[in-house]
Image (cartoon, rainbow, N blue to C red):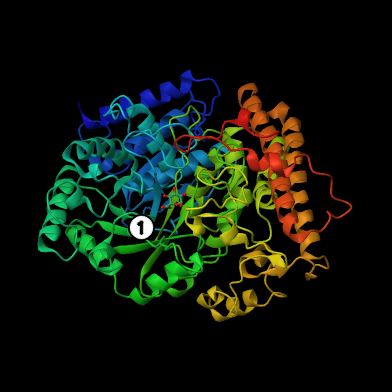
Amino acid sequence: MKFYKRVAIATLLVLQVIGAHAIDGYDLWLRMPMVTDGAKVTIDNPQIPETGNFDPQFAPIAISRSELNTFLHNTGRDVHLAIDAKAPADDGFTIKYGANRIDIKSASAVGVLYGAYHLLRLQQTGHLPKNGQTIKERPMSKYRLLNHWDNLNGTIERGFAGRSIFWSSKGDIVDENSARIQLYARANASIGINGTVLNNVNASPQMLTSERLDQVRRIARILAPYGIKVYLSVNFASPRALGDVSTADPLDPDVIRWWGNKVKEIYDAIPNFGGFLVKANSEGEPGPQDFGRTHVDGANMLADALKPYGGIVMWRAFVYAADSPDRANQAYDEFMPFDGKFRDNVILQVKNGPVDFQPREPIHPLFFSMKRTKVMPEFQITQEYLGESVHSVYLAPMWKEVTDEIDMSVGVAGVSNVGNSQNWCGNDLIQANWYAYGRLAWNKRLSSKQIADEFVRQTFTKEDQGVQTLTDLMLATHEACVNYMMPMGIHHIFAGGHHYGPEPWYAPRGVRVDWTPPYYHKADAFGMGFDRTTKGSNNVSQYPKKLAKLYNNVNTCPEKYLLWFHHVGWTQKLPCGETLWDRLCHKYDEGVRAAEGFVRTWERLKPYIDEERYEALRVKFDRQAKDAWWWRDACLLYFQTFSKLPFPQDCPPVRHDLQTLMQYHLRMDNYTAAPIDQLPD
Ligand code: GCU
């Protein structure tokens, strides 16, 4: 079939699927009514025919035209699309909003598509340009990637929205899922995401078998017209695990040849393949150190194999050893000596904080110090540590604590919260995190408020009062979650295994100590908190001088990081005037009060929200408030066994008793979403 026709039919199919649904969140932020008075859309490049069989590289133009024809109201202006060498590069674009015509121009086809989606977003949010206005956009990060922690059997590690949209235990699901995968591509393109890693960083060697690669090829074909490249997580021991070579030593000539051949096989099938993501020598995954080699040896070997095809290696810096006195120190200690030694197509992928996607962490020190290595941050969109898909927590404010401070020009990765649940994310409101991630990857200067406003207008309501109330609610959720889970720099006091509820006491014999909360909170008769000052683990010294000085002093350390960097006495007076114990109690209370407030606010939003999504979220907000109480009572009652101090008088009495909470164990298989009805009330 002619290429243009194929794209048009596929797009129509997606649109029909969208049209057929009730408001169940399936169409994400692309919930646009089809127009009957569509604008006339012309392609201005003579080499791109209006119809007919043209080069697939122009597919984004065909999609742009189809999207604008279908959804852009007639403004009395014809729309002209053009690839123009003088227009912004790097897939940026201009939209010139003239008296009689709208011109969307970019130096690339996909840039035109981004421009088309931008124009539709402006229409949807009520911000169409003024007559004569020209909008110019250029992405701030080159690689804007989603990482899927999807296993080949269809489960998703830390996924709380159903099963994988790419893989299944049944084998091949690409064809039966192609409409969904296409909508996934469309949603991503609409926010500028340009790459996706299709499988878990804890990667199965099976990912690289020819059968699996054929599935990758077919997924890549669905994504490519939307400007999205596919990448794969690879298991470093693949050559050995697949039985082809007796070792996976990166300096062994047979291993080097094996990777060279494998990369060629991939590019023969998928010419626009992006590259590899590698979790090596981390949490039991194989890596170059197994063979007495270094991260540099491993990463550079893969980079050399990918280089001739323009591929990249994203090498993760998430490493920590069981016997380390401070897990937060390790990535810096292990990687800093390698600064400047990686090939130019290697990017070090560093989690936003030095431990692990906690509700709040200080910025990872590697972002300040790796000066001669390409570095990109990794954020977690899926809420492994923030209440899964049950708690509605808008993450943009958390990410901006990092993105505002670091250089993101190389790229950014986000661990996806997408699964095959009807609304993709298991919660209609946290689709906002997928949306916000893409928007910040494109333009980190956007405010959390603006992104929330855009999201709400495109998904829930366009009525100003409703928009205002819902965005205010969203903006308050992250701080509230930090307060009811782990305020003041406390971290990693989650239940073992699933990370949903509180278990600050969790320390069974035989479990690695750095996987148990007492390693992090260090509560004792004197006080609590991890001493990372120069007198403690000296983690502060990994930061630039100014920050190190700030963090090292208990009186200047920001309260939000206090117990991250200091072991503070229970009765010690803090700069705020309260003792640590009283302040802690008040912060937990603040979190609980906020979570209870969300329930009331949501009820006030009823007139603005459709029945189905209103009810689904009402149940979730109710659970979130109950969980806030559960967290507060569990943590304060447990820490009280050390502090031996009474709650301040203005603190409400507890609802639970410690013994009952300690006996409660949430059973969860495969890290699936927490069963709401089995949690303590
Ligand atoms: C966390 C998470 C794991 C994941 C790991 C990683 O520790 O709990 O499930 O594999 O991060 O990022 O590699």
In screen coordinates, is 220 left or right of 558? Answer: left
Ligand 1 near label 1 (Cβ, under 8 Å)?
Answer: no
Which of the 4 quarters of the picture holds residue 400? Answer: bottom right
Give the image location of residue 218, x and y in percent: 24, 35
Badge 1, how many Cα within 10 Å: few under 14, some, many 20+?
Answer: some
Which residue is at 54% across, 42% downward?
A: 122
Q: Which corner quadrant of the image does residue 5 belong to?
A: top left
Relative image position of residue 422 (x, y in whole percent): 48, 27
Q: Which one is in front, 651 or 349?
A: 651
Q: Look at mark 1 in the image and give the residue it sits on.
A: 89
444 and 301: which one is in front?
A: 301
Residue ranking furthest to the right: 649
Is 281 situated left or right of 258 in this image?
A: right
**Mark 1, secondary structure of its residue:** loop
Mark 1 residue type: Ala
Q: Which image quadrant for residue 184?
A: top left
Q: Position of residue 168 (x, y in %)?
A: 33, 30
Q: Is residue 446 visible?
A: no
